[in-house]
């Protein structure tokens, strides 16, 4: 693949020791799991693969994924753990018990100062249809596709205010050209 | 799949409007792209699928992925954009030009206050071998597998201090049991 020929400072060709390494998941803390699970399941079509409770540390983890119709997920919870950690594109939501009842409690979105994490991104097959779907579900937009310099890219906010980019792969071809 | 029967507050069955939605990428800002690209390519075996420059806004985006030997990535940059945004498990690194030269400049890892984003996670085929690989590359550990309450899970730090969880799927079967 000749894009291997695109050399950038620092980049090395992956070595044998990293074979099978796989970017599995991203973890975001959420204030209210009921609200977040409703949002990611209804609006972004994700399924809860596993819920893991850690009573002694007072938190629960939810692992979510967009599943294709043909994906065969193990029923057995232990096997489903192994399945979950072997995938790409998993979203982990961490609920520290009790935050949902704390008035004024809020997590930091990473875009206000101090900055760090920026956003997660979903690709969709039809951006205008997705925008209509978000509007029908009263999703808050940070940027609609027609706003700003990057056309054909939308940003919405999840219930904690984390930014979610939304792109249609076919519409991204002009980026960086 | 009977895990659909595991009902949690808020969760809805995905509707037709979300068909084809896919969790594509996670974006992290990085201070020094040369250092970050060296780290993610050498230590975690990622390849740079696309580099997108936005001179008028003074930033560059790098899209990285762990590729299997059989993955056929388009050579044409426009087609490679579309390919990149159609995948799962993409890591986007944002470089705001000049931060690498600013003494004391640092991004926020999301785990110190104010909290929000927690970590990204890679799965590996052999955790002890991965730990030896990290040690051989002077990677800083936040938690070695044998430390703390969650055995068989490691956390390392990337060059900006972002936490990276490292798991071996087969060793995760006991979690939450």
Image (spheres, coloured by chain):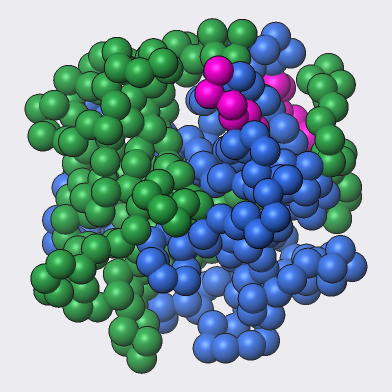
Chain colours: A green, B blue
Task: Say above or below: B62 vs B132.
Answer: above
Along the line of sight, the residue nearer the viewer: A63 or A82: A63
Residue A73 place in picture, x, y as percent: 43, 51
x then y, percent, for residue A86? 57, 54
The answer to whether A75 is drawn above or below residue B175 in the figure is: above
Residue A52 in the image: x percent, y percent? Answer: 37, 72
Residue A173 visible here = yes
- Residue for point 53% across, 23% down: B57
Name the side, left or right, on which A72 lies relative to A140.
right
Q: Quadrant of the image for the C terminus of chain B? A: bottom left
Residue A92 horizontal side relative to residue B142, left or right: left
Q: Answer whether residue B60 is magenta in the image.
A: yes
Residue A121 figure quarter: top left
Residue at 13 percent of width and 26 percent of height = A135
Residue at the limit of the structure toward the bottom, as seen here: A56
Q: Nearer the viewer, residue A145 or A74?
A: A145
In the displayed structure image, the side of residue A132 where residue A54 appears, left or right: right
Nearer to the camera, B112 or B67: B112
Q: How many marks?
A: 0
The quadrant in which residue B19 appears is top left
Residue B139 in which image quadrant: bottom right
Residue at image location 64% in from the left, 34% down from the top: B97
Which stretch did the figure color magenta?
A: B56-73
Q: Residue at x 51, y 59 (%)?
A: B108
Q: Is residue A14 left or right of residue A57?
A: right
Q: Is residue B169 visible?
A: no
Where is residue A30 drawn, in percent x and y? 29, 62
Residue A93 drawn above or below residue A91 = below
Most extreme residue toward the front is B103
Q: Is residue B5 magenta?
A: no
């Amino acid at each position: 693949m000749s894009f291997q020929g695109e050399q950038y400072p620092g980049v090395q060709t992956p070595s044998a020791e990293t074979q099978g390494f796989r970017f599995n998941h991203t973890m975001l803390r959420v204030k209210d799991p009921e609200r977040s699970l409703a949002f990611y399941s209804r609006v972004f079509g994700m399924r809860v693969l596993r819920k893991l409770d850690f009573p002694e540390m007072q938190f629960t983890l939810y692992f979510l994924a967009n599943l294709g119709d043909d994906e065969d997920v193990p029923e057995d919870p232990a096997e489903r753990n192994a399945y979950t950690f072997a995938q790409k594109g998993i979203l982990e939501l961490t609920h520290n018990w009790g935050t949902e009842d704390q008035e004024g409690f809020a997590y930091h979105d990473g875009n206000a100062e101090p900055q760090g994490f920026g956003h997660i991104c979903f690709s969709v097959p039809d951006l205008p249809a997705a925008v209509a779907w978000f509007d029908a579900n009263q999703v808050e937009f940070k940027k609609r596709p027609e706003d700003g310099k990057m056309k054909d890219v939308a940003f919405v906010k999840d219930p904690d205010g984390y930014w979610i980019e939304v792109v249609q792969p076919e519409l991204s071809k002009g980026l960086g050209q």
